[in-house]
Amino acid sequence: MQPAEQLRIDTPEQIALELPVAGIGSRFLALGVDSVLQFVLYFAATLTLVFGVPAIGSGSLPLLAQLGPASAILIGFCIYWGYFAFFEILWSGRTPGKRLAGIRVIKESGRPINAYEAIGRNIMRAIDFLPAMYGLGVVVMMTNRNSRRLGDYLAGTVVIHDRKSRGSLPSWHGAAGRVSPAQSLGNVTLEELALIEAYLQRRSDLDPLVRDGMAERIAKRITDKTGHARDPQQSLDDFLEGVARHVRDTAKFR
Protein backbone atom coordinates (compact mmCIF):
# COMPACT_ATOMS: atom_id res chain seq x y z
CA MET A 1 0.00 0.00 0.00
CA GLN A 2 1.25 3.48 -0.86
CA PRO A 3 2.06 5.33 2.40
CA ALA A 4 0.24 8.57 3.12
CA GLU A 5 2.30 11.74 3.06
CA GLN A 6 -0.10 13.55 5.39
CA LEU A 7 -2.14 12.46 8.37
CA ARG A 8 -5.52 14.19 8.46
CA ILE A 9 -7.00 14.91 11.89
CA ASP A 10 -10.47 16.38 12.31
CA THR A 11 -10.48 18.21 15.63
CA PRO A 12 -13.55 18.80 17.84
CA GLU A 13 -13.31 22.44 16.74
CA GLN A 14 -14.02 21.31 13.14
CA ILE A 15 -10.56 22.27 11.95
CA ALA A 16 -8.85 19.73 9.68
CA LEU A 17 -5.14 19.32 10.40
CA GLU A 18 -2.65 17.63 8.11
CA LEU A 19 0.56 16.34 9.68
CA PRO A 20 3.48 14.76 7.77
CA VAL A 21 3.64 11.02 8.43
CA ALA A 22 7.06 9.48 9.18
CA GLY A 23 7.89 6.63 6.83
CA ILE A 24 9.90 3.44 7.32
CA GLY A 25 13.20 5.11 6.37
CA SER A 26 13.15 7.85 8.99
CA ARG A 27 11.87 5.44 11.64
CA PHE A 28 14.67 2.98 10.97
CA LEU A 29 17.19 5.82 11.13
CA ALA A 30 15.86 6.68 14.56
CA LEU A 31 15.90 3.01 15.56
CA GLY A 32 19.51 2.66 14.44
CA VAL A 33 20.61 5.57 16.61
CA ASP A 34 18.62 4.30 19.59
CA SER A 35 20.04 0.79 19.15
CA VAL A 36 23.59 2.16 19.26
CA LEU A 37 22.78 4.07 22.45
CA GLN A 38 21.24 0.94 23.96
CA PHE A 39 24.42 -0.98 23.15
CA VAL A 40 26.47 1.73 24.87
CA LEU A 41 24.27 1.38 27.95
CA TYR A 42 24.66 -2.42 27.88
CA PHE A 43 28.42 -2.06 27.59
CA ALA A 44 28.66 0.47 30.43
CA ALA A 45 26.48 -1.73 32.64
CA THR A 46 28.61 -4.77 31.85
CA LEU A 47 31.82 -2.96 32.77
CA THR A 48 30.24 -1.82 36.01
CA LEU A 49 29.15 -5.34 36.93
CA VAL A 50 32.44 -6.98 35.91
CA PHE A 51 34.78 -4.55 37.61
CA GLY A 52 32.67 -2.54 40.03
CA VAL A 53 30.61 -5.13 41.90
CA PRO A 54 33.51 -7.55 42.65
CA ALA A 55 35.59 -4.67 43.97
CA ILE A 56 32.81 -3.67 46.34
CA GLY A 57 32.00 -7.25 47.28
CA SER A 58 35.60 -8.01 48.22
CA GLY A 59 35.28 -5.55 51.09
CA SER A 60 32.58 -5.35 53.67
CA LEU A 61 29.68 -6.33 51.37
CA PRO A 62 30.45 -9.73 49.79
CA LEU A 63 26.74 -10.31 49.10
CA LEU A 64 26.87 -7.75 46.27
CA ALA A 65 29.30 -9.91 44.34
CA GLN A 66 26.84 -12.80 44.44
CA LEU A 67 24.13 -10.60 42.97
CA GLY A 68 26.09 -9.92 39.78
CA PRO A 69 24.19 -12.35 37.46
CA ALA A 70 20.79 -11.27 38.78
CA SER A 71 21.77 -7.62 38.45
CA ALA A 72 22.90 -8.19 34.87
CA ILE A 73 19.53 -9.73 33.97
CA LEU A 74 17.61 -6.93 35.67
CA ILE A 75 19.66 -4.16 34.06
CA GLY A 76 19.43 -5.79 30.62
CA PHE A 77 15.67 -6.09 31.01
CA CYS A 78 15.33 -2.42 31.99
CA ILE A 79 17.49 -1.22 29.09
CA TYR A 80 15.68 -3.34 26.49
CA TRP A 81 12.13 -2.70 27.67
CA GLY A 82 12.46 0.66 29.36
CA TYR A 83 14.70 2.71 27.05
CA PHE A 84 12.08 3.68 24.46
CA ALA A 85 9.20 4.13 26.90
CA PHE A 86 11.32 6.20 29.28
CA PHE A 87 12.40 8.72 26.65
CA GLU A 88 9.00 8.87 24.94
CA ILE A 89 7.43 9.75 28.29
CA LEU A 90 10.18 12.21 29.20
CA TRP A 91 10.39 13.95 25.80
CA SER A 92 6.76 13.88 24.65
CA GLY A 93 7.02 11.06 22.12
CA ARG A 94 10.70 11.43 21.25
CA THR A 95 13.74 9.27 21.89
CA PRO A 96 17.30 10.48 21.16
CA GLY A 97 17.08 8.72 17.81
CA LYS A 98 13.70 10.22 17.00
CA ARG A 99 14.96 13.69 17.87
CA LEU A 100 17.90 13.23 15.52
CA ALA A 101 15.61 11.94 12.74
CA GLY A 102 13.11 14.74 13.35
CA ILE A 103 10.15 12.51 14.17
CA ARG A 104 7.89 11.97 17.18
CA VAL A 105 5.00 9.83 18.41
CA ILE A 106 1.56 11.37 18.96
CA LYS A 107 -1.95 10.07 19.55
CA GLU A 108 -4.26 9.63 16.59
CA SER A 109 -6.16 12.65 17.91
CA GLY A 110 -3.03 14.81 17.63
CA ARG A 111 -2.48 15.07 21.38
CA PRO A 112 0.82 14.11 23.06
CA ILE A 113 1.10 10.52 24.26
CA ASN A 114 1.02 9.68 27.95
CA ALA A 115 2.87 7.03 29.95
CA TYR A 116 0.31 4.30 29.24
CA GLU A 117 0.57 4.72 25.48
CA ALA A 118 4.38 4.94 25.58
CA ILE A 119 4.61 1.72 27.59
CA GLY A 120 1.91 -0.07 25.59
CA ARG A 121 3.39 0.61 22.16
CA ASN A 122 6.88 -0.45 23.28
CA ILE A 123 5.75 -3.69 24.92
CA MET A 124 4.75 -4.76 21.40
CA ARG A 125 8.31 -4.35 20.11
CA ALA A 126 9.01 -7.98 20.98
CA ILE A 127 6.28 -9.06 18.55
CA ASP A 128 7.06 -6.42 15.91
CA PHE A 129 10.68 -7.66 15.95
CA LEU A 130 9.70 -11.19 14.85
CA PRO A 131 11.09 -13.18 13.13
CA ALA A 132 14.13 -10.86 13.07
CA MET A 133 15.02 -7.20 12.52
CA TYR A 134 11.42 -6.00 12.95
CA GLY A 135 10.28 -8.13 10.03
CA LEU A 136 6.66 -8.32 11.16
CA GLY A 137 6.65 -4.63 12.05
CA VAL A 138 7.86 -3.66 8.58
CA VAL A 139 5.23 -5.83 6.89
CA VAL A 140 2.46 -4.26 8.98
CA MET A 141 3.81 -0.75 8.29
CA MET A 142 3.78 -1.44 4.55
CA THR A 143 0.14 -2.52 4.62
CA ASN A 144 -1.32 0.68 6.05
CA ARG A 145 -1.17 4.25 4.82
CA ASN A 146 0.13 5.78 8.05
CA SER A 147 3.08 3.36 8.46
CA ARG A 148 1.85 2.10 11.83
CA ARG A 149 3.29 -1.02 13.42
CA LEU A 150 1.41 -3.31 15.82
CA GLY A 151 2.52 -1.24 18.81
CA ASP A 152 0.97 1.86 17.24
CA TYR A 153 -2.32 0.06 16.72
CA LEU A 154 -2.34 -1.15 20.32
CA ALA A 155 -1.65 2.31 21.77
CA GLY A 156 -3.60 4.34 19.20
CA THR A 157 -0.51 6.26 18.11
CA VAL A 158 1.14 7.42 14.90
CA VAL A 159 4.66 8.67 14.15
CA ILE A 160 4.97 12.00 12.36
CA HIS A 161 7.71 14.31 11.21
CA ASP A 162 8.39 16.93 13.84
CA ARG A 163 8.55 20.67 13.28
CA LYS A 164 9.83 23.30 15.63
CA SER A 165 7.02 25.10 17.31
CA ARG A 166 6.93 28.86 17.04
CA GLY A 167 5.71 28.77 20.60
CA SER A 168 2.64 30.16 22.23
CA LEU A 169 1.75 31.63 25.54
CA PRO A 170 -0.47 29.58 27.81
CA SER A 171 -2.77 32.44 28.71
CA TRP A 172 -4.11 35.66 27.31
CA HIS A 173 -1.64 38.45 27.80
CA GLY A 174 -3.34 41.80 27.70
CA ALA A 175 -2.81 44.55 25.19
CA ALA A 176 -0.42 42.55 23.01
CA GLY A 177 -3.40 40.84 21.43
CA ARG A 178 -5.55 43.87 20.65
CA VAL A 179 -6.40 45.14 17.17
CA SER A 180 -7.34 48.57 15.96
CA PRO A 181 -11.07 49.35 16.35
CA ALA A 182 -10.99 50.70 12.81
CA GLN A 183 -10.39 47.21 11.47
CA SER A 184 -13.82 45.69 10.91
CA LEU A 185 -14.44 42.19 12.22
CA GLY A 186 -18.21 42.43 12.11
CA ASN A 187 -18.51 39.33 9.90
CA VAL A 188 -17.21 37.04 12.64
CA THR A 189 -20.00 34.75 13.83
CA LEU A 190 -20.66 33.54 17.33
CA GLU A 191 -19.57 30.04 16.28
CA GLU A 192 -16.26 31.38 14.98
CA LEU A 193 -15.69 33.29 18.20
CA ALA A 194 -16.35 30.09 20.14
CA LEU A 195 -13.86 28.29 17.88
CA ILE A 196 -11.15 30.88 18.56
CA GLU A 197 -11.76 30.86 22.30
CA ALA A 198 -11.78 27.06 22.42
CA TYR A 199 -8.36 27.05 20.77
CA LEU A 200 -7.00 29.72 23.12
CA GLN A 201 -8.19 27.78 26.15
CA ARG A 202 -6.82 24.42 24.95
CA ARG A 203 -3.57 25.47 23.26
CA SER A 204 -1.31 24.75 26.22
CA ASP A 205 -2.53 21.12 26.24
CA LEU A 206 -2.05 20.57 22.49
CA ASP A 207 0.91 19.04 20.77
CA PRO A 208 3.01 21.83 19.19
CA LEU A 209 2.35 20.52 15.67
CA VAL A 210 -1.38 20.40 16.25
CA ARG A 211 -1.37 23.80 17.96
CA ASP A 212 0.47 25.50 15.09
CA GLY A 213 -1.68 23.89 12.42
CA MET A 214 -4.90 24.74 14.21
CA ALA A 215 -3.87 28.37 14.75
CA GLU A 216 -2.92 28.74 11.08
CA ARG A 217 -6.23 27.37 9.85
CA ILE A 218 -8.35 29.42 12.22
CA ALA A 219 -6.44 32.59 11.33
CA LYS A 220 -6.81 31.86 7.60
CA ARG A 221 -10.53 31.28 8.04
CA ILE A 222 -10.92 34.65 9.79
CA THR A 223 -8.78 36.47 7.23
CA ASP A 224 -10.58 34.95 4.25
CA LYS A 225 -13.94 35.92 5.68
CA THR A 226 -13.22 39.39 7.04
CA GLY A 227 -10.21 40.61 5.09
CA HIS A 228 -8.48 41.35 8.39
CA ALA A 229 -4.93 40.02 7.99
CA ARG A 230 -2.31 39.39 10.62
CA ASP A 231 0.52 41.89 10.96
CA PRO A 232 3.84 40.31 9.86
CA GLN A 233 5.32 41.10 13.27
CA GLN A 234 2.36 39.59 15.12
CA SER A 235 2.21 35.98 16.28
CA LEU A 236 -0.77 33.81 15.39
CA ASP A 237 -1.82 33.66 19.03
CA ASP A 238 -1.68 37.45 19.39
CA PHE A 239 -3.72 37.80 16.22
CA LEU A 240 -6.41 35.39 17.41
CA GLU A 241 -6.49 36.96 20.86
CA GLY A 242 -6.93 40.37 19.27
CA VAL A 243 -9.77 39.18 17.08
CA ALA A 244 -11.55 37.57 20.03
CA ARG A 245 -11.13 40.65 22.22
CA HIS A 246 -12.37 43.00 19.52
CA VAL A 247 -15.40 40.87 18.73
CA ARG A 248 -16.21 40.54 22.42
CA ASP A 249 -15.82 44.29 22.93
CA THR A 250 -18.08 45.18 20.02
CA ALA A 251 -20.51 42.28 20.59
CA LYS A 252 -21.53 42.23 16.93
CA PHE A 253 -22.20 38.90 15.29
CA ARG A 254 -23.51 37.89 11.89
Image: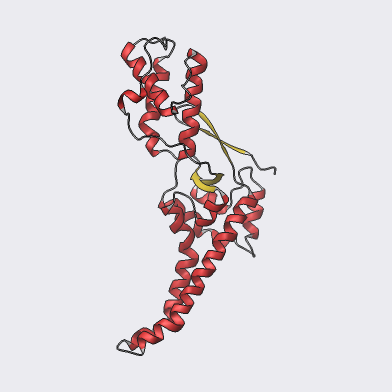
- Residue 23 is left or right of residue 74, and the answer is right
Does residue 189 show up? yes
Which residue is most to the bottom? 58
* Quarter containing the N terminus: top right
* Quarter containing the C terminus: top left
Using the image, determine if residue 95 lies above or below residue 217.
below
Query: Where does the image place residue 98, in percent across and percent down from the top left?
Result: 54, 53
Identify the residue at horizontal 54%, vertical 60% (top origin).
34
- Residue 188 is left or right of residue 147, and the answer is left
- Residue 162 is left or right of residue 180, and the answer is right
Query: Where does the image place residue 221, in percent across and percent down from the top left?
Result: 50, 20
Identify the residue at horizontal 41%, vertical 24% (top origin).
240
187 or 234: nearer the viewer: 234
236 or 200: nearer the viewer: 236
27 or 240: nearer the viewer: 240
Using the image, determine if residue 21 lies above or below residue 251.
below
